[in-house]
Amino acid sequence: MIKKIKKFYLSIPKSRILTLIPMVILFFAFSCKHSSSVEKGIKKEKEKSGLTYIKTTIENGSSLNWELANDSTVNIHLNYDYERNSLNRAYDHWHFLLEAKKGTDLTLVFHNFSEIYNGEKMPFNTWIMDCITSPDDRKWEHVPVEWIEGERMKVKIHMESDSLYIARVDPYRVSDLQNLVSNIEENELVKITPIGNTVEGRKLQIIQVGGDKAPHRIFIRARVHAWEPGGNWVVEGIIKKLLDNSRESKKYLENYTVYILPMANMDGVARGISRFNLNGMDLNRNLTAPADSILAPENAAMEKWLEAMIEKGMKPDLAIDFHNDSNGPLFFSTAGKEKKGYVENMDVLEGLLREHTWFSEHTSFFGTTSFEEGLMARYDIDALVYELNAHWIKGLNKKPLSDDWILLGGELCNVFDLYFKETK
Ligand SMILES: [Zn+2]
C-alpha cells in the first residue's frame, strides 16, 4: 500500500504538487469551518431554549430520558417498569428537577403513555393524568395538561426561578418517613419494631401507636406500590392526630392501638420506581400463599410479624392496605363473604367513612390474590384495600394534594373508634 502511494506521489509532476497543496489546505479549512458552524448552530439553539439540565438523581427521582427538540420544546421519555418478565406502565411515576433560566417558557412533551399492564396493552384514558410543580419539592400545585396525538402529554412551564420540581403525585420520600420516625420515636405512646429488610437491605419497621393492652388492634400497610404516596400522607395524618394529646386522641387510644408498616416498598420509593420491588415482584399479589423470602422479603417480613402477633394472642381486628388509583374505591375480600360478620362489618366501616370523612367513592369485592384476600383467607383478619384516587377527590371536589390525605388520616382516627364501638 505504502509502495503504491509512493509510486503515485512520484508520478505527479513537481510543478503540479505546488498547485495541489493550497487546494488540500482549502478543503480541510472549509470542512472544519462547516462542522464548527453546525456545532455552533446547535449550541446557539440550545442556549436559546434557556434549559440547562433535567436532574433525575434527586431523592425519589424517576428514571427517564430527555432531549431538547427545538428552542423551547423538551421531549421527556418515561421508562417502562417490569413485573418480572412482563412490561408495565411507564407513566405511573415521574419526579424530576427542571433547571432553566428564570423567565424561560418551555413546553414539556411526555412520551410513553401506552397503557401496558402486566404485559397486556389496553385503551388509555387521558383524563387520569395530572402534573404538579413545586419550587421547593414540598409545596405543590397542579398545572394544566394537554393531550396530543400519539399518546403524548404536553405541559407548558414558565420558569419563575432557575429551577422547578415536576411530579405526577405529591411525593413522599424515604427521608420524610425517617423524619417522622425520629420525631415520634421518643414518645411514650410509640413503639418502633424492626421486622426485616427489603431486597436492598433497607430496614422495615412497624410503628405502633398505643399500648399493648388496648381492646382492639388495627394493622395498616402503605406504599406497597412505589408511585402511590397517598397512603404515606394518610399515615402522617393518623399519627399526628393520635399523638396530639387531645381529649379525643386519648379516648381513641383507650379503644384501639394502630400498627403501621408505612413504606412496604421502600427500595422502590428510594429508587423512583413505579410499582414493583427490586425483584420485579408485585407486593400486592400472591398474598394468598406464603411469600417467597428471597423474591419478596418485604411480604415475608410482614407475614412473620403478623404470625408472631397471632401467636401472642394479639391478632389485628382490622387491616387496611392503602393505595392510589384513578377511582378511589374500597376493595373488600371475596373470601370474607364466607366469614360470619365480615360483610356486616364492612358495611359499618363504609357508612362511617361516608359520614365522617370525605370518602364518597364506590366499594367492590375484588377477588384477586391481594392483601384483603390473603389476610382474610390465611389469618382470618377483616381486611380491605383502600384506593385513594390520585386525580380527583369527589367528596372535596378537587384534585388531591398531601394536605387532603393528611386530613383524611386525622378523620380516620374517629372512624376507627366508632367502628369498634359499632361492630363485634
Ligand atoms: Zn397500588
Image: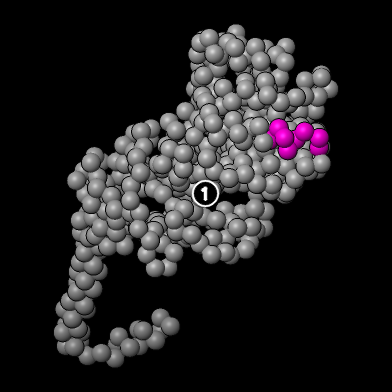
**Type of residue at label 1?**
Ser
* Quadrant of the snapshot with the N terminus: bottom left
Image: 405 above or below 145: above
Neighbor class of circle 1 (other Cα within 10 Å; few <14, some 14-19, many 20+) is: some
Give the side of residue 10 with respect to residue 129, left or right.
left
Classify mark 1: helix, strand or loop.
loop
Give the side of residue 54 with respect to residue 176, left or right.
left
Nearest the eye: 409 or 357:
357
Task: State the image coordinates of residue 177 (x, y, percent, origin top left).
Answer: 53, 27
Task: State the image coordinates of residue 323 (x, y, percent, origin top left).
Answer: 58, 40
Image: 87 above or below 323: below
The quarter holding residue 134 reads top left
* Residue span colored magenta: 339-346
Nearest the eye: 277 or 303:
303
Q: Residue at x 54, y 48 (%)?
A: 327
* Quadrant of the snapshot with the C terminus: top right
Task: State the image coordinates of residue 390 (x, y, percent, origin top left).
Answer: 49, 44
User: Can residue 368 be seen from the camera position used here?
Assistant: yes
Q: Residue at x 70, y 29 (%)?
A: 318
Q: Which residue is drawn at 75% across and 45% down?
A: 334
